Image (cartoon, rainbow, N blue to C red):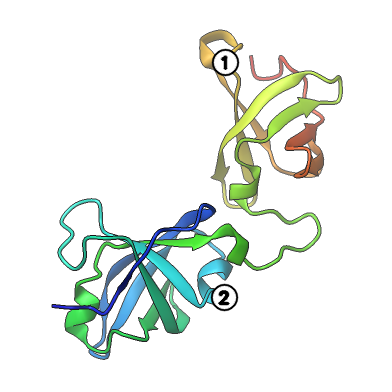
């Protein structure tokens, strides 16, 4: 079955933001699992880049571009339909597809608001000028986010966990690729 997908190269700044769970309804809609609790990027983008499912891909084999006809929130997921897929059979062929969007297409953030992807890899430096490591991951604990800092100079490459709240985060300098924190080097050790 030809899905009418446009084979394409991904932009260099493409990030995985969700996955297609399954077909939804009979008119070509698909159900989406967003990887963010606030899927602004998925809702605002007019084009998504799809990569085949890592296992069991049956609908398409190459990275593809799809144009969004409509996307909306549905319970704790999203539902979407594309310009070139008009029936359930076509939608079912996309099951498991991974969704990517260029970072340059993400909506602008407010002051003191950051996308997690922008924090990854930033150096973390405390008020004494000591480098604690780099942001390796972020954990959502519900009420707050926690930075997971990797520092290969700590015993056993121990991670440092710092709540991403104003009590500990002094300044985020995206241009300088660093985060200043009020956190002693040996607090977690």
Q: Which of the 4 image quadrants contains residue 84?
A: bottom left
- Give the side of residue 18 with respect to residue 160, left or right: left
Q: Position of residue 175 (x, y in %)?
A: 78, 44
What residue appears at the point 23 percent right and 89 percent down from the top-left corner?
26
Q: Nearer the viewer, residue 46 or 88?
A: 46
Q: How far apart are marks 1 and 2 (CA)?
A: 38 Å
- The disc, 1 or 2, on the residue closer to the chain's N-terminal end is 2
Viewport quadrant of the C terminus: top right
Q: Position of residue 80 (x, y in %)?
A: 39, 80
Answer yes or no: is residue 169 visible.
Answer: yes
The answer to whether residue 6 is above or below residue 19 is below
- Name the residue carrying label 1: 152
What residue appears at the point 27 percent right and 59 percent down from the top-left corner?
52
Q: Nearer the viewer, residue 65 or 140?
A: 65
- Name the residue carrying label 2: 44
What residue appears at the point 77 percent right and 63 percent down from the top-left corner?
110
Q: What element carries label 2?
A: helix
The answer to whether residue 86 is above or below residue 133 is below
- Give the side of residue 170 with respect to residue 113, left or right: right
Q: Which of 178 and 79 is in front in this view?
A: 178
Viewport quadrant of the N terminus: bottom left
Q: Is mark 1 on a helix, strand or loop?
A: loop
Q: Nearer the viewer, residue 170 or 4?
A: 4
- Give the side of residue 149 with respect to residue 72, left or right: right
- Circle on res. 26: none
Q: Position of residue 14 (x, y in %)?
A: 50, 56
Q: Position of residue 55 (x, y in %)?
A: 19, 52
Q: Which of the 4 image quadrants contains residue 70?
A: bottom left
């Amino acid at each position: 079955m030809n899905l009418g997908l446009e084979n394409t190269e991904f932009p260099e700044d493409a990030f995985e933001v969700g996955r297609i769970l399954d077909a939804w309804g009979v008119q070509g809609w698909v159900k989406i699992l967003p990887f963010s609790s606030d899927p602004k990027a998925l809702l605002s983008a007019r084009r998504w880049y799809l990569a085949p499912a890592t296992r069991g891909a049956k609908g398409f084999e190459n990275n593809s571009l799809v144009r969004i006809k409509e996307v909306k929130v549905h319970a704790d997921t999203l539902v979407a339909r594309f310009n070139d897929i008009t029936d359930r059979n076509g939608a079912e062929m996309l099951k498991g597809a991974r969704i990517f969007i260029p970072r340059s297409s993400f909506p602008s953030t407010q002051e003191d608001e950051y996308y997690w992807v922008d924090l990854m890899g930033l150096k973390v430096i405390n008020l004494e000028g000591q480098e604690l490591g780099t942001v390796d991951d972020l954990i959502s604990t519900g009420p707050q986010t926690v930075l997971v800092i990797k520092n290969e100079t700590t015993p056993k490459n121990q991670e440092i966990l710092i709540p991403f709240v104003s009590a500990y985060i002094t300044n985020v300098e995206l241009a300088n690729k660093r985060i200043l924190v009020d956190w002693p080097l040996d607090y977690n050790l």
